[in-house]
Image (cartoon, grey):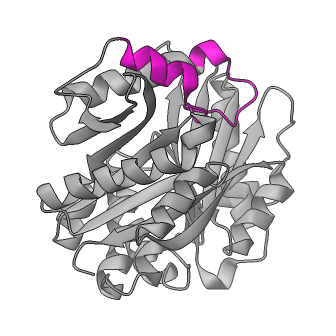
Amino acid sequence: MTIIDLKTHPVTGWKQTVIDNYAFLPYWWIRGVTSQSRQALMSQELDKILATEKTRLLGYISDRGDLLGFAQMHRLEWDTNHFGFEIWRLDHLGAWDTARQSTVAKDLVQGSLQVAHEQGCQNLQARIPIDNLSAIHALESSGFQTMEIQTIWIFNLTKSPIPPKANPHLVRDFEPTDTEALIKLARTVYAPIPHRSHVDPHLSPKAGNELWVEWIRNACSGQLADHIAVAESNGEIIGYSTMKYHSDHDGFCNARIAELGLGAMAPNFRNRGIVTDVVIHNLEWLEHRQADFCFVGTQGNNIPPQRVWLKVGFKPAMMRLTLHYWTND
């Protein structure tokens, strides 16, 4: 067997082999997305990786020359700049030869770690569906540690009615003048959340908290959000919910899809149905644009928002693990 760099030494038909055999293509967990769309989205993703410098594509080649698995990783530029050291993420790790699945996955992990060392990477992260057990076992046996379990929930706008708001007078669309108030709120409300940046002892708690501030700042600028629902009471900003609208991914997907991002509510205004209302406000915005699906994720032990999503009509769709490897350990 050989681990090769598919970007510099591509084997014939490697991309189609990945698309045909990898079980976790984009949106594999949304039933309304066709297999043709998933394949088209994966093809587009692989093309972007080939055209981007700080990415790597590894392939496991058998003695007969067959591609039996692949791994894809890229530099997390934003995280690297925020935390001040080199951070990469393993986005895909697939092994499809049943007889050698464990071996293929382990060798691909070792190849990924070698790339990490060559790139001066101090923290290599992995985000893996819990269904991909061979990958998870290979990561754990190589020294990766689980930092969080994420749950992904989905709302089907084509089948589920959007419930009415309980406090419609308190919720409105974002205005640019709201930015500083949203940043101020973000700086104070996220510390208790069991996020990977909080539970990893290698990461500074202060830098972890500021991550949310940068996220909402970039959402307000339009970089990380296309719509923000804002809750306001007596002239005071008390909450928000951001959303990124992917639409049909430039025509590659047969469904129009959106993703809820960052949400927050001032402690004194929780448990009044206002958090539910800002989520509903974003769904109403999507309904006007004839969207099909909206999904959202959080840590599995972050229970309050999941109760909100269940109340609105979201349903659990899938779970994934975030794992960290530190090269200096």
Confirm whether residue 242 shows in the render: no
Taking 241 as reference, is 82 left or right?
left
Who's the residue at 70% across and 66% down the image? 305
**x and y percent of residue 112 in the render?**
30, 52
Please tell me whether residue 110 is drawn above or below residue 257 in the rendered image.
below
Q: Please state the total of marks drawn on the protein image.
A: 0
Q: Quadrant of residue 109?
A: bottom left
Nearer-the-camera pick, 153 or 187:
153
**x and y percent of residue 289 in the render?**
62, 24
Residue 254 belongs to magenta span: no
Who's the residue at 83% across and 57% down the image? 310
Q: Quadrant of residue 297?
A: bottom right
Nearer-the-camera pick, 117 or 125:
117
**x and y percent of residue 218 in the render?**
32, 53
**x and y percent of residue 41 in the render?**
49, 22
Residue 34 belongs to magenta span: yes
